[in-house]
Image: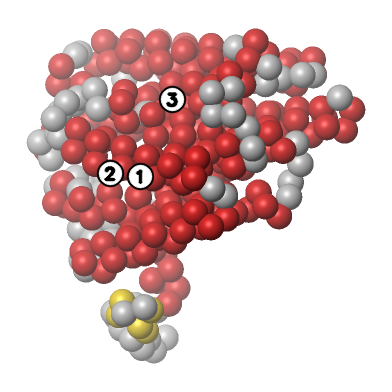
């Protein structure tokens, strides 16, 4: 297929790539899976307050999607030299040479600005403050902290708790309401094993890149014990949902109990197994699947409550 140069708002796309290839590069730059999960959790936070899907709901969710994509793109610009030294990340758009760093920087700023303006004109100041705080915390606190301490994931996990709170606030909910606090706590805890399971899969990469890593501070067995405790904490935080007033129907409680039991059983299997990359990868995938099921369960419960509550 013959390709031609395309200019978007002053950014020239290299003629060596087709539009489809550039679309794939942009998706990689935005870490689209992470961005979509943040967007989904925002939508659930909104639903927990509004109780129904409305056109207005798409304003904060679209804004968070733009902010998340822009923040991830900015993170890749910030860590481009580190990414070049890691097998897991050297094929990303910037270290692979497929995208110029300045182009990625402009795209990231454009996305962040678009998301911020969407919140400012479409939602209001509380949501805007939360969105900007998430970007600042991720890119100017967590990102540089990763080069200084092996435990950067703990303060960095705060970013994961913000999208559902933002959605809740955008629908008119109080930020300090304990109900959204319960969901925010779940995502805060979930984020830590999410990062450390990735680290277990690519521990040598982090060492080669010169990054602090808990695998250099503890033995493989000790690291698995630490991750196992966080996995159990993730499951335990879900079981507190009824006490936070997030669950209203017994059927949904039973569903979450069954899914959480499955999740904890798999966490036990992960801990008892020999430390292999495949084991960490499987635990990582099941952790992500568990988060999606939890969000879907909360959405179902809220819809049932509106219809029959």
Q: CA distance from mark 3 to mark 1?
A: 16 Å
Q: Position of residue 281 (x, y in %)?
A: 40, 32
Residue ID for mark 1: 135
Which element is circle 2 on?
Answer: helix
Mark 3 vs mark 1, foreground winner is: 1
Quarter that holds the N terminus: bottom left
Q: How is the image coloured?
A: secondary structure
Classify 148 as above or below 9: above
Q: Quadrant of residue 259?
A: top right
Residue ID for mark 3: 188
Residue ID for mark 2: 139
Which element is circle 3 on?
Answer: helix
Which element is circle 1 on?
Answer: helix
Q: CA distance from mark 2 to mark 1?
A: 6 Å
Dot 3 or dot 2: first in sequence order is 2
Q: Residues within 10 Å of mark 2 (few under 14, many from 20)?
A: many
Dot 3 or dot 1: first in sequence order is 1
For the residues bearing labels 2 and 1, Cβ distance under 8 angstroms = yes
Q: Position of residue 51 (x, y in %)?
A: 75, 36
Residue under the image location 38 percent in, 79 percent down:
8
Quarter that holds the C terminus: top right
2 left or right of 93?
right
45 left or right of 11?
right
Classify 118 as above or below 142: below
Q: Position of residue 146 (x, y in %)?
A: 20, 33
Q: CA distance from mark 3 to mark 2?
A: 17 Å
265 left or right of 277?
right
Residue under the image location 33 percent in, 86 percent down:
5
159 left or right of 147?
right
């Amino acid at each position: 297929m013959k390709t031609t140069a395309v200019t978007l708002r002053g950014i020239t796309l290299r003629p060596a790539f087709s539009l489809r290839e550039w679309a794939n590069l942009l998706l990689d730059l935005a870490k689209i899976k992470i961005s979509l999960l943040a967007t989904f959790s925002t939508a659930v936070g909104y639903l927990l307050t509004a109780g129904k899907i409305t056109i207005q709901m798409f304003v904060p969710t679209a804004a968070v999607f733009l902010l998340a994509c822009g923040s991830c793109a900015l993170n890749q610009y910030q860590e481009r030299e580190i990414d070049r030294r890691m097998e897991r990340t050297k094929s990303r758009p910037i270290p692979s040479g497929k995208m110029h760093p300045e182009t990625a920087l402009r795209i990231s700023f454009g996305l962040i600005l678009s998301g911020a303006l969407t919140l400012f004109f479409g939602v209001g100041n509380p949501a805007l403050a939360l969105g900007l705080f998430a970007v600042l915390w991720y890119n100017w606190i967590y990102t540089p902290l990763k080069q200084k301490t092996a435990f950067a994931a703990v303060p960095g996990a705060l970013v994961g708790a913000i999208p559902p709170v933002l959605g809740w606030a955008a629908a008119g909910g109080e930020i300090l309401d304990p109900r959204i606090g319960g969901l925010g706590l779940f995502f805060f805890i979930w984020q830590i094993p999410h990062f450390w399971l990735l680290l277990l899969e690519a521990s040598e990469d982090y060492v080669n890149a010169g990054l602090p890593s808990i695998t250099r501070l503890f033995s493989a067995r000790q690291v698995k014990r630490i991750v196992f405790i966080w996995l159990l904490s993730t499951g335990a935080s879900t079981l507190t949902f009824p006490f936070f007033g997030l669950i209203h129907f017994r059927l949904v409680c039973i569903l979450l109990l069954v899914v959480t039991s499955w999740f904890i059983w798999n966490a036990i299997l992960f801990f008892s197994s020999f430390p292999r990359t495949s084991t960490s990868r499987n635990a990582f995938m099941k952790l992500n699947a568990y988060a999606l099921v939890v969000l879907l369960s909360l959405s179902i419960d809220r819809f049932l409550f509106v219809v029959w509550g």
